[in-house]
Amino acid sequence: MSVGVKANFVVLVPTVRALVPNGAIFLDAANGNASTIKSTSGTVDVINSSAAATNLVTKLMQAAAPMAVNTPVSKRADGQIQIADANAPEGRDLIGVLLQASVNAGDIVSVLLVGANMQDAVSGLGFNVGDEIYVSDSGGYTNDPSSLTGMDSIIKIGIADCSAGGASTTATDLILFPDVVSNL
């Protein structure tokens, strides 16, 4: 089954295969919470069986401080995750929810993402980890919405992120969660 097959809906909690409706993407509790798709005919396939770090809906990240399971997290400029905080500029962009029961500073942890992780989508484009990424005037990416001219909309694509499994300031990946910021 192709990863590009569209599902009817998404189940975002670790669950039992038999209870998942056909056509859903889910975290398979029996398979280490791997991202899994259940086809419309009932066939179950792990989306990416190579490692949890490369799954579409979960990603291995480094914690900046102790946190509890189900804590909403955001990405810091140094590539680590922190507790999301609506009052702090670096904590406003929610990227996911912590899946681990107990976390200490420096631990590599599994995060349930708010949107798909697109590996290498912004690699080499000069973005920093945590940058908000928008659709540019030329159809590419920009992290500066004030540079947009003559557009009818400002569309946020997501947040630039580092590769899975650690912390880095080099943005390679893109966590998708589109939002129309402004319609002119």
Image (cartoon, grey):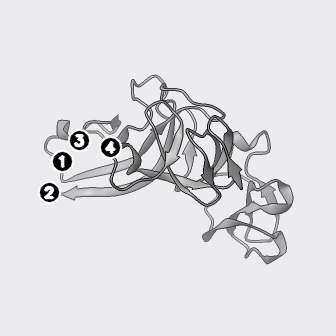
Q: Residues within 10 Å of mark 3 (few under 14, many from 20)?
A: some
CB under 8 Å between discs 1 and 2: yes
**At 49% across and 25% down in the image, what residue appears?**
170
> What residue sits right under mark 2 in the picture?
184
**At 84% across and 56% down in the image, what residue appears?**
31
Q: Residues within 10 Å of mark 4 (few under 14, many from 20)?
A: many
> What residue sits right under mark 4 in the picture?
135
Q: Nearer the viewer, residue 184 or 110?
A: 110
* Tag 2: amino acid: Leu
Secondary structure at badge 1 equals: loop
* Tag 4: amino acid: Val
Q: Earlier in the sequence, mark 4 or mark 3?
A: 4
Q: Residues within 10 Å of mark 1 (few under 14, many from 20)?
A: few
Q: Earlier in the sequence, mark 1 or mark 2?
A: 1
- In the rendered image, the quadrant that contains the N terminus is bottom right
Q: Earlier in the sequence, mark 1 or mark 3?
A: 3
Is 116 displayed left or right of 160 in the figure? right
Secondary structure at badge 3 equals: helix
Task: Tell us which disc is closer to us: 4 or 3.
Answer: 3
Q: Position of residue 27 (x, y in %)?
A: 72, 60
Asked if 109 appears above or below 69 in the picture, the reply is above
CA–CA distance in space, label 4 to label 1: 10 Å
Q: Residue 100 bears which disc, if any? A: none
Secondary structure at badge 4 equals: strand
Q: Position of residue 147 (x, y in %)?
A: 19, 36
Q: Earlier in the sequence, mark 4 or mark 1?
A: 4
**At 56% across and 51% down in the image, what residue appears?**
116
Q: Earlier in the sequence, mark 4 or mark 2?
A: 4
Q: Residue 145 bears which disc, if any? A: 3
